[in-house]
């Protein structure tokens, strides 16, 4: 609890002081993430195939594929092209995501502390919460797309991964 002030200050900066105007830095971060995902395809091929297959059967696995699977790599590749061709559009999309996510009316803060430390931390957390924007919560739904029934993905690797999934 002695580092709570520093933790909450960092969290405040991350949530409320983000600068979206540095195109080169954002592009660098996207390219690094894309390169890491591409480099992990061959050594993690069995996990990539597993994730891809499961995404067609379960909404949670579909979401995991969107955030960390092949679909996320496709998204990053598209995002690189968008940053280079439509920077103002990317900024607007990022602001919209921030508007949706940073809304204290629809946020949940999960804190695990004993009762004594919770009493001390609670007031500090309340200050951060008060600084967050508030708007009526807007329920959102996933637009779940089923993966193709038959799909082939090719990467330059010495190992092949073949899988079949069924409900």
Image: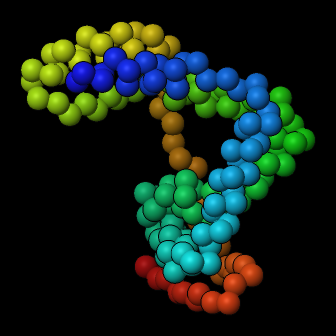
Answer with the quarter of the image where residue 36 lies. bottom right
Left or right for 20, reference 10: right
The reply to whether residue 9 is in sight is yes
Q: How many marks?
A: 0
Residue 153: % across, % down: 70, 78
Answer with the quarter of the image where residue 125 lies. top left
Residue 154: % across, % down: 73, 80
| Image: 165 above or below 118 | below
Left or right for 147, reference 82: left
| Image: 56 above or below 34 | below
Residue drawn 50% across the image and 70% down it: 51
Name the image quarter holding the C terminus: bottom left
The reply to whether residue 136 is in sight is no
Residue drawn 45% across the image and 10% down it: 131
Residue drawn 47% across the image and 32% down it: 139
Residue 157: % across, % down: 69, 84
| Image: 129 above or below 80 | above
Residue 76: % across, % down: 71, 53
State how the image is colored: rainbow
Front-most of 27 and 134?
A: 27
Point out the residue furthest to the right here. 85
| Image: 118 above or below 139 | above
Name the image quarter holding the N terminus: top left
Residue drawn 46% across the image and 24% down it: 10
């Amino acid at each position: 609890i002695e580092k709570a002030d520093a933790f909450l200050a960092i969290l405040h900066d991350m949530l409320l002081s983000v600068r979206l105007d540095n195109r080169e830095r954002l592009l660098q971060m996207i390219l690094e993430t894309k390169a890491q995902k591409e480099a992990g395809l061959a050594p993690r091929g069995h996990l990539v195939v597993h994730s891809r297959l499961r995404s067609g059967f379960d909404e949670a696995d579909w979401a995991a594929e969107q955030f960390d699977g092949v679909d996320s790599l496709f998204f990053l590749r598209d995002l690189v092209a968008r940053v280079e061709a439509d920077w103002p559009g990317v900024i607007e999309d990022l602001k919209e995501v921030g508007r949706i996510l940073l809304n204290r009316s629809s946020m949940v803060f999960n804190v695990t502390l004993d009762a004594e430390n919770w009493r001390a931390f609670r007031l500090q957390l309340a200050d951060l919460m008060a600084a967050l924007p508030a708007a009526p919560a807007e329920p959102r739904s996933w637009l779940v797309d089923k993966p193709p029934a038959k799909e082939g993905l090719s990467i330059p690797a010495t190992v092949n991964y073949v899988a079949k999934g069924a409900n």
